[in-house]
Amino acid sequence: MIILSGGTGTPKLLRGLKNVIPEEGITVIVNTAEDRWVSGNLVCPDIDTVLYTFAGLIDEKKWWGIKNDTFYTHEALKKLGYREPMKLGDQDRAAHIFRSELISSGYTLTEATERLRLSLGVKARVLPMTDDPVATMIYTSEGEMHFQDFWIAHKGEPKVLDVRFDGLDAAKPTTEMISALSSEDTIIIGPSNPITSIGPILELKGIIPILQKKHVIAISPIIRNKPVSGPAGKLMKAMGYEVSSAGVAQCYEDFLDVLVIHRKDDCVVHNVKVVKIDTMMTSPKEGERLARFIIELTKY
Ligand code: FO1
């Protein structure tokens, strides 16, 4: 089974899925456009959330970082007068250091992710969407800023005027992710934000033509007119989409076959098959239930 993922929403489905099918049978293609160099190391929030979820290490209160991590280095830097733009835990930072050392010595991001995957004992395949740098830039009423600054320092509050992906035009999808996508009949798009989590994956050259030949199932991250978590609503609105499951279907209209929406969402969605179930995943069991439902849908 192959799933496109960002860092919020989809990992909750992966937590359920790994208890329902063998982890070895899962491939996740992950957004890298929210990656950022912090304190000399490359932080890949979405890749790390996916890896930590499979490894059973994810902090399930925040859905980023490692549970029970300490923040000694982050606090020590603050005392020295340097405020990091992201609050990095000590164990989490170790992964960033290892990744950055590998990249500095010539490994690609795909190879470095593979090394981390093996070290963490993760059996699922975790594939970055590209090995090239891409940065999500948010244009706001308070100026242009990196996604992480918008979300963390500015708490997602400024009015969003536009979203752009620096470096995306020149970025190549990896051969690993192209061959993984090509080898499956059904592609799942997890309940992640369609603009900044799934959007960059779709905008890579050659991805939409592949998806048009596949049976594509997406899970809406919006229930009625509200995102389950994160800035999806604000970003969809800024990019001219209705904040609803119909808006999500519109984001994917070029290739979508089935949209899974919450059973209480009465949104009218045109031109795509809609199926309903409880899509909330506050507990692992709820993630497993949704995972079983998605597996049934793949046997169309
Ligand atoms: N989100 C926050 O709201 N505040 C933080 O300080 C923060 C630090 C952080 C460190 C590592 C990491 O992998 C993720 C982190 N996140 C933090 C989450 C991140 O900003 C976003 O939620 C993801 O990029 C969304 O996909």
Image: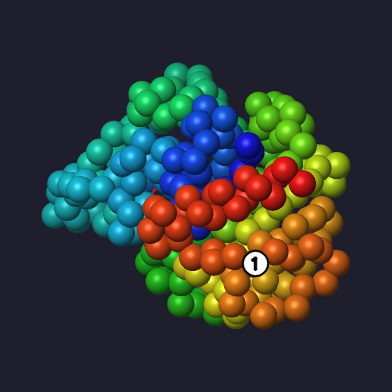
Could you say which is closer to the camera, residue 74 or residue 251? 251
The N terminus appears in which quarter of the rendering? top right
Q: Is residue 231 visible?
A: no
**Residue, disc 1:** 276
As shown in the figure, which amino acid type bears the numbered disc 1?
Lys
Residue 280 image point, x, y percent: 49, 65
Which residue is pictured at 59% across the width and 70% down the height? 262
Which residue is pictured at 70% across the width and 45% down the height? 298
Residue 24 image point, x, y percent: 52, 27
Could you say which is closer to the camera, residue 47 or residue 34? 47
Residue 276 image point, x, y percent: 65, 67
Q: Crowding near pointer 1: few (<14 within 10 Å), some, many (20+)? A: some
Could you say which is closer to the camera, residue 265 or residue 189? 265
Q: Is residue 208 left or right of residue 232?
A: right
Q: Secondary structure at mark 1?
A: strand
Residue 288 position (above or below residue 144): above
Q: Is residue 277 visible?
A: yes
Could you say which is closer to the camera, residue 174 or residue 170? 174
Which residue is pictured at 70% across the width and 64% down the height? 275
In the picture, residue 19 is in which quadrant?
Answer: top left
Q: Quadrant of ligand 1?
A: bottom left
Q: Is residue 2 left or right of residue 34?
A: right
Badge 1 residue CB within 8 Å of ligand 1: no
Residue 175 position (above or below residue 148): above
Which residue is pictured at 54% across the width and 66% down the height? 278
Residue 178 image point, x, y percent: 72, 31
Name the image colouring.
rainbow
